[in-house]
Amino acid sequence: MTNLLKFIVALSLSVTFLNAESIQAQAKALVEKGVEFCKKVGVESCIEEFNKPESEFVKDDLYIWANDFDGIITAHPKKPLKGKNLYRYKDKVGNQLFKNCIEKVKADGSGWVDYIWEHPTNGEQTLKTSFVIGIGKDQLIGAGVYK
């Protein structure tokens, strides 16, 4: 392989990696903004806002969703999931993603959780990671990005 080709491949990989980090940073920042909003207006009001498809917390494929610690979805602006208990829901490889999110928040207060979710553009099951953090006494919010 020529040095120029090696350079182009290395540069492409670096840009892809930096872009992925940047998108994850955007998701984390959106969730942190959501936490501040919840502190200001209260959990009930912020959950109402997170359910709105035109909310300031929805930016294309990046949005905040919420569920309580029983696994009941309290906010999802993209799919009609509000009120559904997804605690036992498994993705195509067996991850109980909502249970895993709850466990992450209970154990660490916040963090990243990986799972498979349907991509909104192509409909394919795609690897996704979400940053989750607790709000109130028994809820969490999160925002995810496709890998």
Image: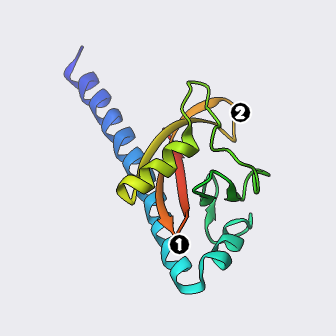
The image shows residue 62, relative to residue 54, as above or below, that is above
Of residues 15 and 122, the one nearer the viewer is 122
Question: Does label 1 or label 2 sit earlier along the sequence?
Answer: 2
Of residues 10 and 8, the one nearer the viewer is 10
Residue 86 is drawn in which quadrant?
Answer: top right
Tell me the kind of residue under disc 2: Gly
Can you give x and y, in whole percent of width and height, for residue 50 in the image?
66, 67
Instruction: Tell me the residue at 69%/41% (across/down).
Output: 120
- Relative placement, left or right, of 121 versus 12 is right
In the picture, the quarter occupied by the N terminus is: top left
Would you name the residue on which mark 1 appears? 136
Of residues 88 and 122, the one nearer the viewer is 88
Instruction: Tell me the residue at 37%/53% (across/down).
Output: 107
Tell me the kind of residue under disc 1: Gly
- SS at badge 2: loop
Q: Residue furthest right?
A: 80
- Relative placement, left or right, of 122 versus 95 is right
Instruction: Tell me the residue at 54%/44% (across/down).
Output: 99
Instruction: Tell me the residue at 71%/33% (across/down).
Output: 123
Task: Determine which of the numbered discs, if any, sits on residue 113 in the image.
Answer: none
Can you give x and y, in whole percent of width and height, for residue 98 in the image?
57, 45
Can you give x and y, in whole percent of width and height, for residue 69 in the image?
57, 56
Of residues 58 and 16, the one nearer the viewer is 58
**Image coloring type:** rainbow
The image shows residue 131, relative to residue 9, as above or below, that is below
Task: Determine which of the numbered discs, if any, sits on residue 123 in the image.
Answer: 2
**CA distance separating discs 1 and 2:** 33 Å
Can you give x and y, in whole percent of width and height, for residue 106 in the image?
43, 56
Mark yes or no: residue 86 visible: yes
Q: Residues within 10 Å of mark 2 (few under 14, many from 20)?
A: few
Q: Residue furthest bottom?
A: 40
- Relative placement, left or right, of 26 versus 141 is left
